[in-house]
Amino acid sequence: MIGAGIFVLPGAAVERAGPLAAVAFVLGGAIALLTALSASELGTAMPKSGGAYYYVNHALGPLFGSVAGWSNWMGLAFASAFYMTGFGQYVVLFLPVPDLTVGGVTLAATKLVALAGAALFVFVNYVGAKETGRLQNVIVVTLVGILAAFTAVGALNADLATLRPIVPPDRGFAPLLPVTGLVFVSYLGFVQITSVAEEIKDPGRNLPRAVIGSVLIVTTIYALVLVTVLAAVDNSLVAGNDTAVVDVARALAGPLGAAALLFGGLLATASSANASILASSRINFAMGRDRIVSAELNEIHPRFGTPYRSIGVTGAFILLFVLVADVETLATAGSVLHLLIYGLLNVALIVMREADPEDYRPDYRVPLYPLVPALGAVVSFALIAFIEPFVVLLSLAFVAFAGLWYLGYARGKADKQGVLGHYILHRSEEMPRSAVSVATSVQPDGGTYRVMVPLANPAHETDLITLASAIAKHRGGTVVAINVVQVPDQTPLEAAREQGDLDDAHAILAAARDDAETFGVSVETHAVLSHRSFEEVFDAARTYGADLTVMGWGPDSHGAPGRAEGAVDEFAHSLPCDFLVLKDRGLDPSRILVPTAGGPDSDLSAAIAATLRAEYGSEVTLLHVTDHETDGEEFLRSWAEAHDLGDARLVVESGDVEAAIERHAAAASLLVIGATERGLLSRLVRGTLVLDVVEDVDCSVLLAETARERTLRERLFG
């Protein structure tokens, strides 16, 4: 934190706000302090690598985690580019570095030095120079000593009259918040303490001291230095001067003072850049661990032992930002992205307090809750509005990219649900439908196989949940039990929700939860209010991110008699996921018959049979009916091997397909059969093999249909 901010930004701040710039530095520290209090509580409750990113991801879920992670990563890259540009400004004070013109484009000496310095520090982190922690300690102690001496000399020469009027008469307080946004980049370091919380001894005691103490100490140093600068010399020497503290030191203490501050500026900008590059690898590691980015980014170099890919990508961004942006754009971009993170961090604290999960037991608690985190969130987000619009739009573009990155890439890979999403989904019957819909539509589905079970008849609840739990357990997944509470068309759903007559739904869902938990699988339960019944299952499968739906086969299951949209829904939409429909005559998976002629639905039948065999030790018989028995045996043998059923009993025979299925089903306890390829009108007008078999056999029947896109003609005529 004792970095480039106080060495590079005073000139720009004083040019905009005059003596009010000192107030801007103090205000920036006060805003940082609110977040420091929240970060301290979260850090003592969850001492994990990743810091602010981890807290946001854990509390608000991976969508916000993606935003926080990318914002932190890019914010550090912008800050590093800012530090190195400041480094370049200090180097050209004593080295006559010429500008470089290439192809008619002139690269200023400051940019050349900044690019060279950035490349050097990226390389140092790439090869993993040892003892960097001790070096940082030495640098910080040296900087504090230089600034203390500078402040003391300045105080001896101070004239407080030069500070008046502290508020510029021509501009008033208008520059205060924009300048605060500019200098806020000076306070980015404190949250990085939490990113190494796993390595802090006694974090419950030491982490709050480090986080809160750093903000208080640095704010005090910044305020004293700036007040000294403004009181000791005329403001004209400071305003607009990129290396103002050096010129002030020269005026107060001659060449020796200038040399000391020049040396301090070089140390500050270099150490800040190095620390930011180092911190970025921690953020990338945590994001890779949560599958927000590819874990390959965290691959360790076999020789240097560093996450070289992460450092290389970060270095490329830093070099790009140095090349295309000026110092104020770099500073404000870093500020905006970190203000977003700090706002989300405060929101994360509120979520953790209100949800109160069992594992949330902080050693330190924020005083005056919820005022402090609420105020911290509001002022962090609000300050963004006072920063240069172009920079805000640029930063928001990164945020939009992070959201799209999650939806397009990370959602299918991440498997960690946030506390907020968990809280909403486990109280879905109490929450607004819109909140439940949003929570389910953005929740991660990578690595978590979700088996949805629509429950209506308590008599069949146990068998359906047993089947769903066996599949979910085998896949390491989750059971999602729903009960569709049908509301008359005349009654608004919100009115029905307020009336709250859901006792029957809660009873059947509670039984489902108990049954599923006996299998050791995680379970969600949701009461869904709807004007529809069967048709709502399709929407629920989409809403709750189901990979497979297991449902009962009741008298109204196909076509939903009495409601026109029942038939329309079936051919107007493709199946949102794989479906298993159980004609329940007592679930007994000990002897399973799987008829097959190939095709996607038979593939699903085979997968379910293999799963049940793994869970229950079932005997599986595969049946293929064909007039060419020799070719049929070869087909069935290769099909069985391809579907992990090579040890199943294989039966090939000719004749009538339906008769063969009925004959072999007499010795089976469960018939698993793929759905017909015929469409809606074919089923209604001509009937189907599947529906006839279901009624003719005595055992339970499991109808399997694979999710797939079908044209309108295929949906109508098969």
Image (tube, rainbow, N blue to C red):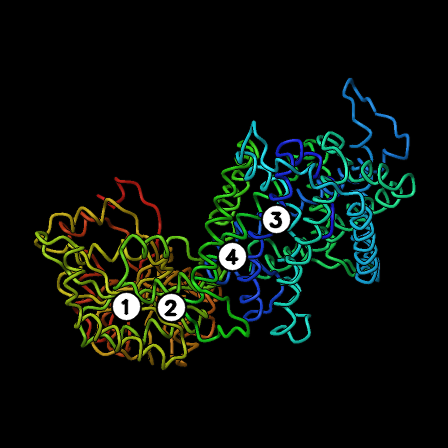
Nearer mark to the viewer, of 1 and 3: 3
- Mark 2: few, some, or many residues within 10 Å (few <14, many ≥20)? many
Q: Which mark is residue 702?
A: 1
Q: Position of residue 288 (x, y in %)?
A: 60, 58
Pointers 1 and 4 in contact (CB under 8 A)? no
Please determine whether, in this image, residue 657 is positioned above or below residue 68: below
Q: Position of residue 546 (x, y in %)?
A: 36, 59
Q: Earlier in the sequence, mark 2 or mark 1?
A: 2
Q: Which mark is residue 26?
A: 3
Q: Which mark is residue 356?
A: none
Residue at mark 1 to residue at mark 3: CA–CA distance: 69 Å
Pointers 1 and 3 in contact (CB under 8 A)? no
Q: Earlier in the sequence, mark 3 or mark 4?
A: 3
Q: Amino acid at mark 3?
A: Val
Q: Amino acid at mark 1?
A: Leu
Residue at the image point whose x is 61% and y is 51% from the top: 29
- Mark 3: few, some, or many residues within 10 Å (few <14, many ≥20)? many
Q: Position of residue 483 (x, y in %)?
A: 22, 66
- Mark 1: few, some, or many residues within 10 Å (few <14, many ≥20)? many
What element does badge 2 sit on? helix
Residue at the image point whose x is 59% and y is 57% from the top: 287
Pointers 2 and 1 in contact (CB under 8 A)? yes
Pointers 3 and 2 in contact (CB under 8 A)? no
Q: Which quadrant of the structure image shows residue 587?
A: bottom left
- Which residue occupies the extreme top position in the image? 104
Residue at the image point whose x is 28% and y is 71% from the top: 671
Q: Which residue is mark 2?
A: 608
Residue at the image point whose x is 65% and y is 63% from the top: 213
Q: Amino acid at mark 2?
A: Ile
Residue at mark 3 to residue at mark 4: CA–CA distance: 21 Å
Q: Which residue is mark 4?
A: 345
